[in-house]
Amino acid sequence: MARQQQRRRKRYPVNGWLVLDKPLKLTSNDALGQLKRIFHPEKVGHAGTLDPLASGCLPIAFGEATKTVPYVMDGHKVYRFEVTWGTQTNTDDAEGEVIASSDARPSEAEILAVLPEFEGTIMQRPPAFSAIKIDGNRAYDLAREGEEVEIPERPIEVHRLCLVEIRDEQRAVFEAECGKGTYVRALARDLGARLGTCGYVTDLRRLLVGPFGEADMVTLEDLQEISADVESEDPLENGELMDCLLPVETALYQLGNVVITGDAASRVQRGNPVILRGADAPIGPEEIYVTHAGKLIAFGEVSKGKFQPKRVFKL
């Protein structure tokens, strides 16, 4: 029995990114828990949560990939979402209680006319039911306790907002490409108000986060099936399962890459700076990542031709 318990507790050095197609009605943490039972990783985390009522792109970082999470979280995100007109809820989605209603329904022309107002740098008030902290407390905890939650407006970036289709008089589908900190639920709420009615999100799917899109997504069902086909619980022995992972450096898509020699790689792996050689070597200041023999070594800053590692990888 003791040996069985010890085997169940064993963790493996899994490294890389998994792009999960998160299903509806599952929290991001619950999805993470299921992946832990499949991969048994030494270390794992996700790059940005998705609400239970949202599906789609949830990037999961295993092992050394956790060092690159900020680069993914800071990347652009694309959402496709359905807005139902005429109703407002306290959560700005279908989970909440109705707090207002309107008989007005916007036309296609009216919708198209106001969309440019919601592009670029705009001010947005996050929903009361959000994870933003107010005096050390999560806003959604205060809201659930019946407290009046007033979150200040803050600037956000909406790079693109377009009307995809009008399903009927009640519902319209939009696609938004936005930056970090944008709440799609608040976009729906504010669109409704601008159009002289109410609106809330009734369907939400994330299509892209940073470098990860729909073509990269894997479902939980597929992962569970792949895992069940192999007797060993060691994911490193399951080639089909490991093929679902993307390289750690995929998250560093916005950085330049410099290939360094073996001697320089050894110095960098000890945390030491090195002079970058070669006619194409960057002078800086800029952030890059360095590789040797196809292996990620580190990312860091280049200044005056010298690379100073910020994070070193053990791959």
Image (cartoon, helix red, strand yellow):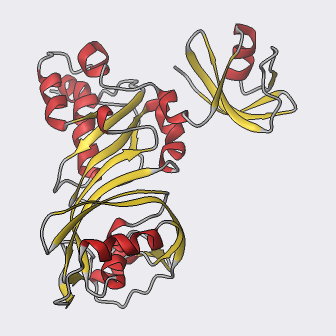
Residue, far right: 304
Query: Is residue 214 among what the camera can see?
Result: yes
Is residue 219 shown above or below 29?
A: above
Q: Nearer the viewer, residue 14 or 120?
A: 120
- Location of residue 112 in the rendering, given as x and y in whole percent from the top left corner: 34, 69
Query: Is residue 128 among what the camera can see?
Result: no
Q: Which of 314 and 197 is in front in this view?
A: 197
Q: Write the residue at 53% across / 38% down.
A: 68
Kindly indicate the quadrant of the structure image that contains residue 149.
Answer: bottom left
- Considering the image in quadrants, where does the N terminus appear? top left
Asked if residue 136 lies left or right of residue 21, the reply is right
Is residue 193 shown above or below 51?
A: below
Asked if residue 161 lies left or right of residue 155, the reply is left
Count of marks placed on residues: 0
Is residue 28 shown above or below 106?
A: above
Q: Write the residue at 45% across / 69% down.
A: 116
Asked if residue 300 lies left or right of residue 210, the reply is right
Q: Write the residue at 42% across / 75% down.
A: 126
Kindly indicate the quadrant of the structure image that contains residue 241.
Answer: top left
Kindly indicate the quadrant of the structure image that contains residue 313.
Answer: top right
Is residue 138 shown above or below 195?
A: above
- Location of residue 54 in the rendering, given as x and y in whole percent from the top left corner: 24, 57
Asked if residue 243 lies left or right of residue 63, the reply is left
Q: Write the residue at 30% across / 38% down.
A: 214
